[in-house]
Image: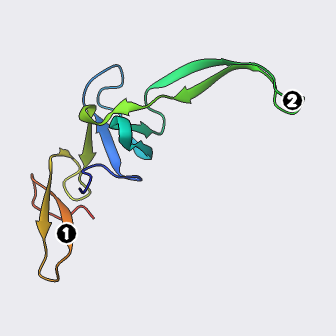
Amino acid sequence: MAAKIRRNDQVQVLTGKDRGRRGPVRQMVTDKDRAIVTGINMMKRHRRSTNPQQPGGIIDLEAPIAISNLAVVCKSCDKPARVGFRLLEDGRKVRYCKHCNEAID
């Protein structure tokens, strides 16, 4: 099954504390239907020093966010878009924006 959101896609957050913010998808967690987006859904973690070169302290990490709360941003119309799939004449399957009907890939 093809995924509507993929790695390196520009996405916009639809709900939650980061609503309206955009960022690229850094990693997909496919078994839990979540994505890690750069700079979105930040949380603080207290880390212990494991060696002298890596000091302990409070660090900021990106937490995974549910993909149902994300929308792919179309490059041509610059809007968060619903994604559909289409077969081209050469047999390739591509994603397209349902607003402007342009291919996303």
Q: Is residue 22 in sight in this rendering?
A: no
Q: Report the residue at 87% width, 33% height from top.
A: 53
Q: Which residue reaches farthest right?
A: 52
Position of 90 with respect to 35 (left or right) is left
In the rendered view, tell whether residue 32 sits above or below residue 50: below
> Type of residue at label 1?
Lys
The vertical placement of 9 against 19, above or below, is: below
As helix, strand or loop, the secondary structure at mark 1 comes to strand
> Residue 74: horizontal and vertical position, in percent?
23, 53
- Label 1 crowd (10 A; few <14 / some 14-19 / many >=20): few
Residue neighbourhood size for the residue with mark 2, other residues' Cα within 10 Å, grouped as few (<14), some (14–19), many (≥20)? few
SS type, badge 2: loop
6 relative position to 39: left or right: left
Residue 101 % position (x, y): 9, 61
Q: Which residue is mark 1?
A: 93
The type of residue carrying mark 2 is: Asn
- Label 1 to label 2, Cα distance in Å? 49 Å
Q: Is residue 94 visible?
A: yes
Q: Earlier in the sequence, mark 1 or mark 2?
A: 2
Work out whether 8 lies above or below 22: below
For label 2, the residue is 51
Horizontal and vertical percent for residue 70? 28, 37
Q: Quadrant of the C terminus?
A: bottom left
Cβ atoms under marks 1 and 2 closer than 8 Å = no
- Where in the figure is residue 91, as x and y percent of width and height? 16, 79
- In which quadrant of the rendered view does residue 15 lie? top left
Locate the N terminus and report the quarter of the image it occupies: bottom left
State the colouring used for the structure image. Answer: rainbow
* Horizontal relation, residue 36 to residue 2: left or right: right
**Vertical relation: 6 (above or below) 56:** below
Q: Is residue 94 left or right of residue 30?
A: left
